[in-house]
Amino acid sequence: MHMRLVAVGDRQPAWVDAAFSDYIGRLPRVWKFALCTQATSRRRKQGNVAAAKQEEGERILEALRPAERAVMLDEGGRQLSSVELADAVADWQRDARDVCFVIGGPDGIDKPCLQRADFCWSLSRLTLPHGLARVVFAEQLYRASTLHEGHPYHRA
């Protein structure tokens, strides 16, 4: 199983890139994790937010491969504990489909993308900046990998 993150927002602060890279560097090599960033669609003061969100959604759908399991990170998704995420990742590994996680733009993920989702995951009920969501995602993915390896990183 290979994993990817498609994330809208191609410029992040250095601390986001550093923390994200640190956690991703710890993931199992067999996952062959890859990050695919996409530019945020331009929003004007009096522009149409829905049009920008739709444009981002179209690019996300183009980036998804037909056989991939699509996991959308969305505030309306299901919240999981770290153990539940680890179990979900283990289930996904057993069915051997590649997994593509998606973090949308500043206004969220467009409805057609959500309809394409095999699973919608909410990191928190809190509103998180996109960079921080990216870091939390990476840390939780690393934590999930350590849980099933019996590594002491996760202390419950």
Image (tube, helix red, strand yellow):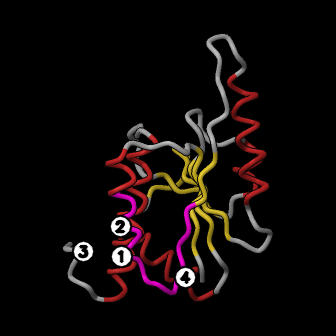
Please identify the quarter of the rendering in which residue 79 is found: bottom left
* Label annotation for residue 23: 2
- Rounded to the nearest angstrom, the CA distance separating label 4 from label 3 is 19 Å
Neighbor class of circle 4 (other Cα within 10 Å; few <14, some 14-19, many 20+) is: few
Q: Residue at x 65, y 17 (%)?
A: 44
- Rounded to the nearest angstrom, the CA distance separating label 1 from label 3 is 14 Å
Amino acid type assigned to the residue bearing label 2 in the image: Tyr
Image quarter in which the C terminus is found: bottom left
Magenta stretch encompasses residue 20: yes
Q: Is residue 91 left or right of residue 25?
A: right
Return the x and y of residue 3 as percentages of the image width and height: 57, 73
Q: Nearer the viewer, mark 4 or mark 1?
A: 1
Return the x and y of residue 95 as percentages of the image width and height: 64, 86
Q: Nearer the viewer, mark 1 or mark 3?
A: 1
In the rendered structure, which disc, 4 or 3, sits on the residue that comes first in sequence? 4
Amino acid type assigned to the residue bearing label 3 in the image: His
Amino acid type assigned to the residue bearing label 4 in the image: Asp
Return the x and y of residue 5 as percentages of the image width and height: 56, 61
Whether tag 1 and tag 2 are in contact, CB under 8 A, the answer is: yes
- Rounded to the nearest angstrom, the CA distance separating label 3 from label 2 is 14 Å
> Circle 4 sits on which residue?
91
- Rounded to the nearest angstrom, the CA distance separating label 4 from label 1 is 20 Å
